[in-house]
Image: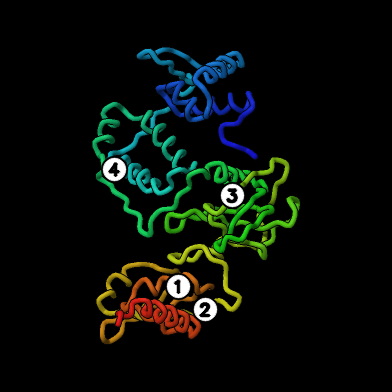
Amino acid sequence: MYKRGEYGQVARALRVLDALRGYKRGRWVTKVGTEIGVSERTVRRDLAELQDAGFDIEVTRRDGRVIATLIDERTATPIAITKRERFSLLAVRRVFDVLQGTPFLEDVRSVFAKLEQRMSDKERAELASFGERFVYMPDHGTKSYAGKEDIIDAIQTGILSSKVVRYRYADAKGRARSGHLAPLAIALYRHGLYVIAVRLKEPDGLAAAANVGIFAIERFNEAEHLRSHTFAMPADFKLASVLHGAFGPHLPDEDGPHEILIEFAADKAGYVTSRTWHESQRIEVMPDGAVRVSMRLPALGSVRSWVLEWGVAARALAPTKLVDAIGDEARRTAARYKPKS
């Protein structure tokens, strides 16, 4: 099983080289070692090997610590970034905090650090002064991806290099699955990561849209990309077919698509009409100020949860299957709050 931090000497040296790219002012060798998962002594040995191989790397001491600089980066063209753009970068950085413990957040931090290297002292000081002036407060909580770094890394590699991934997975009911996947894309929905992938009967099997599934990353127990097995995107698959706006990534119901009709109370009309819930939505304002939202959706599961979140402010009118499901769940919920006699 591939693990981040376990490298052969050549592969590790290339990781050291990558860790220096984009840093005009160089990097502390201790920081590079921590990032890669090896000692400072090992990094310094790799730097010497890279210098012997012809890479122009300067290794110096500053404040009693060793710093390494890839010389080509010193002559890189500076990037002009406006004050507003720096603030927007800070906003992006804050949003990615919901992906704590994932390579995505690590990469965003790395890009941010490289951009700071291109800033003047005044610009960096100004960026630091922004502090908490942009705050991102995630609704529906955040998921924990502690210990999933290798899994996410393997899936990312599968997507970027079209590599088949061997996996073990536990579904929502705890049932174990294993096999091979052709990972097509990753979706971020309600601050959780989901993989859209094709299940393969064999590592060399054809990727067909009929076998597309959606997998929550936190439920993977193992994932390993196979270097010698590649796949091609199914010709008959469109990513948009499983992405449904505010209702997230979903596979269609067997009896879908469904014509949805939801009525919202007048005091929620402004909130409802100011948002796009789905590209197919149509809004009708009623004489009493209430609004009706109609949509065409392939699955009912997430719509049921959405309507229930609104409590008495929303009422499903169609289809009958949705109305009955919401009514049944509302009655069972109310039964749990009956006053004690």
Percent across and percent down for residue 336 are 37, 76
Determine if residue 75 is in view. no
Could you say which quadrant of the image residue 227 lies in? Answer: top right
Give the residue type that dot 2 points to: His
Percent across and percent down for residue 16 are 53, 25
Going from the N terminus, do you reach mark 4 or mark 2 first? 4
Cα distance between the residues tagged 1 and 3: 29 Å
Q: What residue is disc 3 on? A: 221
Q: Are the two marked residues, 2 and 1, in contact with CB atoms closer than 8 angstroms?
A: yes
Give the residue type that dot 1 points to: Val
Cα distance between the residues tagged 3 and 4: 42 Å
Determine if residue 209 is in view. yes
Q: Nearer the viewer, mark 2 or mark 3?
A: 3
Going from the N terminus, do you reach mark 1 or mark 3 first? 3
Percent across and percent down for residue 94 are 35, 45
Going from the N terminus, do you reach mark 3 or mark 4 first? 4
Cα distance between the residues tagged 4 and 2: 44 Å
Cα distance between the residues tagged 4 and 1: 38 Å
Pick whichever, 86 or 319, lies toward us: 319
Q: Which mark is residue 258?
A: 2
Q: What residue is disc 1 on? A: 303
Please report the residue visible at 32 percent of the width from the left and 39 percent of the height from the top: 86
Query: Could you say whether the residue bearing mark 3 is in a helix, strand or loop?
Result: strand
Q: What residue is disc 4 on? A: 84
Cα distance between the residues tagged 2 and 1: 11 Å
Please report the residue visible at 34 percent of the width from the left and 73 percent of the height from the top: 310
